[in-house]
Amino acid sequence: MKKIASVLSMIVLIMSCSNDDNYEPTTFENPELDLNIPADFPLLNSSFYDNIPTTYGVELGEKLFTEKRFSIDNSVSCSSCHIQTSAFADHNSLAIGVEGRVGLRNTPPLQNLAFMNFYNWDGSKLQLENQPLVPIITHEEMDSSILEVIGKIENDPEYEDLFEKAYGDEDVTADRIYNSIAQYEYTLISANSKYDRIQRNEGETYTTDEAQGALIFEQKCASCHSTALFTDQSFRNIGFPINPNTEEAGRARVTGDIEDYMSFRVPTLRNIEHTAPYGSFGQFETLRAVLDYFDNGVIASDNLDPILKDNNNRIPLTEEEKTNLIAFLTTLSDNEFLGLEY
Amino acid sequence: MKNLKKYILSAAVLVAFMSCSSEDDNPVANSVTLEFNNTFGDTPIILGDATSSSATVNTSDAGQVHHFQEVKYVVSNIRLIKADGTEIPYNVNDLDNGATVVNQSNPETLSYVLSDIPVGDYSEIKFGLGVRSDLNTLDQVSFPDFYDNAGANDTQMHWEWGTGYRFTKIEGFYDTDNKELSFHSGSTLEGEEGNYTQGVDAYRDITLTLPTTAVVGNSAPTISIKADFDYLLSGDSYTVTLVSTEDITNNATPSAHTATEMMKFVDNIGGDSNTTSPGMFSIISIEN
């Protein structure tokens, strides 16, 4: 018995030696990216500091973001639904995954995520690094698994090179995949719209309509769509038409709190001109339709947002106000961010 | 370093196994079999589709007839407690070797064998209904076997959006017109481990005192456990009336896949997290 044990421990020693032999720590150059953090933006999500974007981490993340082998049949990548010219959203009412499967909600745009404290419509995730696994495994999205993804890409020389450059060796691990994608997403900062340039006094001015719209916005929208992100990141039930899918409960899906039933995170309005349709399941085709709905009155409920309750369940707007509001909202379009001519 | 630890560990495990087998006459360990009996009261559950004539039909305290087509739940974090209070954890941090999906439609899964349990007299068993939060991350890299088993097409115990496991999955029918009933549970906790800032914990720790001692030695005992699904609608915590209305404050919708409705059912079958109630679980018998 003792003999066997000592033989075994010798094998262990030999194995560990050979392991150490393979491990050659190489110094590698992978500088942190110098992100241009807008002065008036809120604080960064604290997870950012545990996963600071690096030159090659971001390059790898961007490549992974467009990697169709993430999906079971190699047909869908992150960027299939998160399209740059749509502020990394798309124009479907509901997200479409492999084999045309239809998801629960509207694809959210990806912008200024580094400054957000809640992710997804219901705030189910609090750090970006925890999010990439969700679409990879979800039946209606990519319907794959992380080991399947790793198996498909780990012997690809391009990835070997990028993982080496980003992390010092070519090991393709789950955490490296999640972190790289999050690093890339951290760099998606939109802060160069006409609105921003006016805020920075760079010489541009609003048209009359836009200026009128900005005033109405301050009066009737900015209590929720606040800060430079144009969302206060609160969860509110604003009485929008309800998703018929029984999986939907809004924020209550996460918290179990009846007070959160059909509440959703106040969406950012940046690049809103480019992210139609609107609402958690794409209920509204146009911005005008959203404003008409607010003007006509929303669905009453016990947990309807107090601001709406105090205003007879509506946000009254004249037709001219709607036109001007939309004019103002288009000044939040950032063509540089969208990859459009500017 | 990590690898080195693994090698040493597996070597140690091998050594442990070898030492056992060489001393058959005076065993230091033996197996314990957990047998799960899914019932309505004392009647074993027979599954069936909407119009099945063989399915076991139950009537809730609210007077609603119901029967099931699918009954699945995860058991993990198993601990056996000796009469002297010593707790023997069974691979409690290893889902591949210490967790299982009990699936009523698959008889093999109704027995779960705990191997290599140290000799002794056991008077109590503890286990989790669901997966402890620290392990509930759908970590395929660490626990590929449990991940695959739980995610198999005929099992479907991944809760994708919460990146955790489904702890229970019950599909069935209720009322005389056989409306669909669907109940899934899982945790939605998020934040730093141990310092969760949002979400619900649907994991329930179950403690059952054994009516007679389970003697591990030359004998390899079987602990027969009852899971009485009458508790789902008629539990100690809630008497549930299933109502197909959008007014979710009016008791429970028959399709509970979200945390809003889920916790009523979780408390019924797993016990309120603030009490030591074992929910639907009890011990039927010990066979030594």
Image: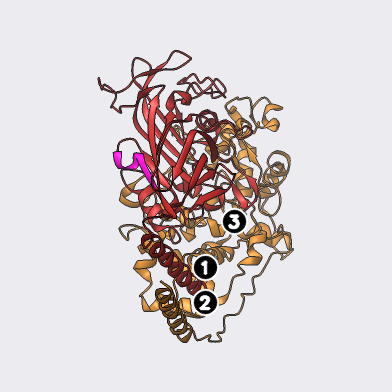
Chain colours: A orange, B red
Residue underneath mark 3: A127
Question: A39 left or right of B189?
Answer: right
Q: Residue at x 68, y 66 (%)?
A: A37
| Nearest the eye: A114 or A307 | A114
Q: Earlier in the sequence, mark 1 or mark 2?
A: 2
Q: Residue at x 73, y 40 (%)?
A: A219
Give the extent of the magenta segment. B107-113
Give the residue type that dot 1 points to. Ser
Q: Residues within 10 Å of mark 3 (few under 14, many from 20)?
A: many
Q: Secondary structure at mark 3?
A: loop
Q: Pinpoint residue B286: horizontal percent, then vertical percent.
A: 42, 35
Q: Chain of mark 3?
A: A
The Cα–Cα distance between marks 1 and 2, rounded to whole angstroms, is 9 Å
Q: Earlier in the sequence, mark 3 or mark 2?
A: 3
- Marks 1/2 in contact by CB < 8 Å: the verdict is yes
Residue A225 belongs to magenta span: no
Q: Pinpoint residue A34: horizontal percent, then vertical percent.
A: 64, 74
Residue underneath mark 2: A166
Q: Is residue A292 above or below residue A287?
A: above
Q: Is residue B166 visible?
A: no
Residue B111 belongs to magenta span: yes
Give the residue type that dot 3 points to. Gln
